[in-house]
Amino acid sequence: MGCEQEKEVDSYDFFDKIENYIDNVNNAQSSSSVGGVSGCNTFSTVSKSWFNDELIAKNVCEELIKLYESLNYLKNMQIRDANYNNESRFFNYGVNFKISKSMIKGSDCIKNIFNSIESQCDSVFHNQLDISVIYDIDKNDMHKMNILYNLYENYVKIKAIIDGKSGMDDQSLYSHSTACCTDYFKTSYICDADNKSKNLKFCEKLETFVSKYRGLYNTVDQKGPPFTENFIKLEECPNPKIITTAVTGTVVGLIPLFGVLYKVSELKNKL
């Protein structure tokens, strides 16, 4: 089925608030309560043409409800607030990621599948979303957004370890730094001299990430070992051919966002 994919000029703007959204998602994931359960049950029974298994369909529905419930500006339709637009774009990214990774390929458009979730779960989506919120994201943009999200997922974890706000060990610092290297290498051709003009928004957001990541250097240097031994600066990233074990780490960043439903190897091949 041919689905019209859209490229919106502001589709990357939610990355200005991505660290907040990652926190929201993590908090939502830790919550066991999900509204609209009956609606998700109904959706799972009418979605056989979209998903291979009713449980997968039900989980897709529940995870998207959790994500929606974590976005207050969107949920409360505060359309005059700038945060509303950012949350709308982030939610659309989440909808595209979650559904595209779970659905039977080519069975329908992302927008149509979400419309079914929204209609079955009207107790949750009592403020019906504006028709402009959900659309099928251009595949190239989706690929680049996945890279940026992975980079920030690992950055947030690295920063938490450095700041002493995480229970993760020193080896985790190394694995998350290595994962950043893996994804950072993926951007080298996107933002090189020949391609940067075609990817201005992405490259702009990438530069913001790089600036934040480099902002950790002084803190790490001041802390000394074992932080300096396990943290990898972007300029010191090893050749990607010898850090293939980090590929798992790069996709793990996206998994907590919407639940573990896929084999890591499948994700690795499609990112």
Image: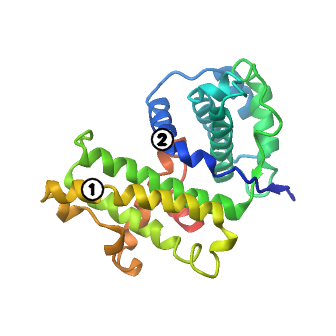
Q: Residue at x 37, y 80 (%)?
A: 239
Q: Residue at x 52, y 38 (%)?
A: 21
Mark 2 residue type: Ile
Residue 60 image offset from top left, x and y in percent? 63, 39
Mark 1 residue type: Leu
Give residue 196's quadrant in the image. bottom right
Q: Nearer the viewer, residue 173 or 163?
A: 163
Question: Tell me, what colour scheme is on the image?
Answer: rainbow
Marked residue nearer the N-terminal end (2 or 1): 2
Q: Residues within 10 Å of mark 2 (few under 14, many from 20)?
A: some
Q: On screen, 240 above or below 168? A: below
Q: Which residue is mark 1?
A: 173
Q: In the picture provided, is 185 more to the left or to the right than 93?
A: left
Q: Residue at x 80, y 55 (%)?
A: 6
Give residue 9's quadrant in the image. bottom right
Q: Residue at x 66, y 29 (%)?
A: 81
Q: Nearer the viewer, residue 46 or 246?
A: 246
Q: Which residue is mark 2?
A: 22
Q: In the picture, which quadrant includes the N terminus?
A: bottom right
Q: On screen, 42 above or below 176? A: above
